[in-house]
Amino acid sequence: MAFFTIGSFVSKLLVFFLVPFYTSVLTESEYGIADVMQSSLLLLVPLLSVNAGEAALRYGLEYTDDRDIIFSSGLKRVSLSVIPVMIISGVLSLLFPGYRIYFLFFLILYTADAFYEYMLLYCQGTEEVKKMIMGSVSSTFFVIVSNLFFLLVLRMGIYGYLISQILAFSLSALLMFILTDGREKLRSAGTKDSYALNREMGDYGRSMLLYSTASWVNNAIDRYFILFLLGSVQNGLYGVAYKIPAILTTIQRIFAMAWQMSAVKEYKGDDREEFFSKMYRSYQTILVIGCAGIILLLKVIAGVMFRNDFFEAWILVPPLLISVVFGALEGFLGSIALAFKDGRSMGIATGAGAVFNIVLNFFWIRSMGSTGAALSTLVSYFVMFVLAFIFVRRHVKLKVFIVRDVIAYCLLLTESVLVIRGVDNYFYWNAGIVLILISLYFNEVVNILKRSSGFFGRKPSE
């Protein structure tokens, strides 16, 4: 987690400071178009590559002697996934010639992002964490430098934004390929019998398709509803609103990357229930208190990040923040299920959440606008979380305090209502709620601080 914190926090912090820059140089419509492209990648990369990256992560941790085969197999799947994107982009370019330039950009962006994401997951699965961090940090560096050049110097607008993304993904993927000695791995894999392992990895990837697709629906379908029902301007505002929950998402992803590795290594251990339960309670504590703290300072953060007409997006943030909490907890439970190679259960949980999301978006966006989309996301993630918790009990009986947790979630909702409604002295009321939450999770807070101080107090030999 220390290594992941350095890599992820540095990267996300730098990108975080770019948000005011984006909202000052891009229009709401341009930002909305770019946001839809990014959301589409979240669906298409795992779907078309048949979860090649996730398979490389899972099997790389377990089959340490066959990592060259795993590398080659996943890379082939990613390469083949570019073909359908090329065909679809070509057809759409003919049908909608006015948007031809965007379809071309998307094809190149997909190719770059698919290889970048695969290399990140492969490095994580082979426990080459330093190389993964170098790839992540270098991507951020390339994004910042190219954004400043294309957006500030050349003033290329959305085209400059997309070119900078393509360059960052491509160069970082190439860097990780070189650092992992990719050419030698491909050569070595070509001399081995890899049919059985390739087939098993393919089966694992296919078993996760419902899970990954439904996860995308919950992450992104609301943006498509907003785009088609309300227009690209509102979609741009909604996309910007997600930037504040990204603060909490960054913390969540740091933990999730380390947890994915730990879950696979520990799922056969005799003390797995105690280990998983402690990790769950610690994770939940960080998420709940972190969410409450961001809601408390929401308008201050929005004032710093959002420029011009983007500021009004702050009102969408509270339900999106709480949805991050439930989504992160569902992801934690999902890692346990996937360690047991139980992709089916998580597919059902995320599928149910996706159905709720689609139905509620259809009705609530029409009646409440973008607020309806945010609320739909919150409800769908809660449904996923509850079902995932039930399914994971087949494998591990987590020791949790349900009454306390329900009270905490209700307090987060109360805090959100107070800030959205602009209740008199809401800041002080919400500060009180944050203190109550800290007291509810006091034992976990103390344990987290002890473990942290113990880690940072270690001698190099330890």
Image (tube, grey):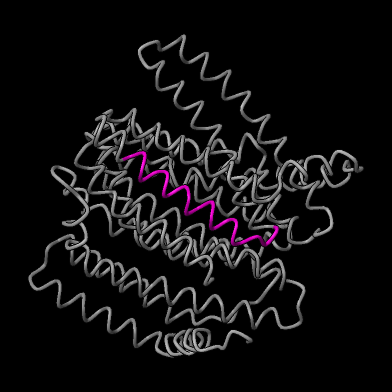
- Magenta segment includes 17: no
Residue 411, position in %: x, y?
30, 74
Main secondary structure found in the magenta portion: helix
Considering the image in quadrants, where does the C terminus appear? bottom right
Which picture quadrant has residue 146?
Answer: top left
Q: Is 138 positioned to the left or the right of 372 in the image?
A: right
Q: Residue at x 70, y 50 (%)?
A: 56
What range is drawn magenta here?
126-147
Could you say which is closer to the camera, residue 417 or residue 209?
209
Looking at the image, which residue is at 68% across and 59% down?
338
* Residue 438 in the image, given as x and y percentages of width and height: 34, 84
The residue lying toward the viewer, choosing from 31 and 291, is 31
Q: How many marks?
A: 0
Q: Left or right of 306: which side holds 241?
A: right
Of residues 317 and 45, the one drawn nearer to the viewer in this rendering: 45
On screen, residue 247 versus residue 396, left or right, reads left
Residue extending furthest left?
A: 424
Question: Which residue occupies 27% across, 35% down?
Answer: 151
Where is residue 199 shown, x and y percent of the image? 83, 42
Quarter in which the N terminus is drawn: bottom right
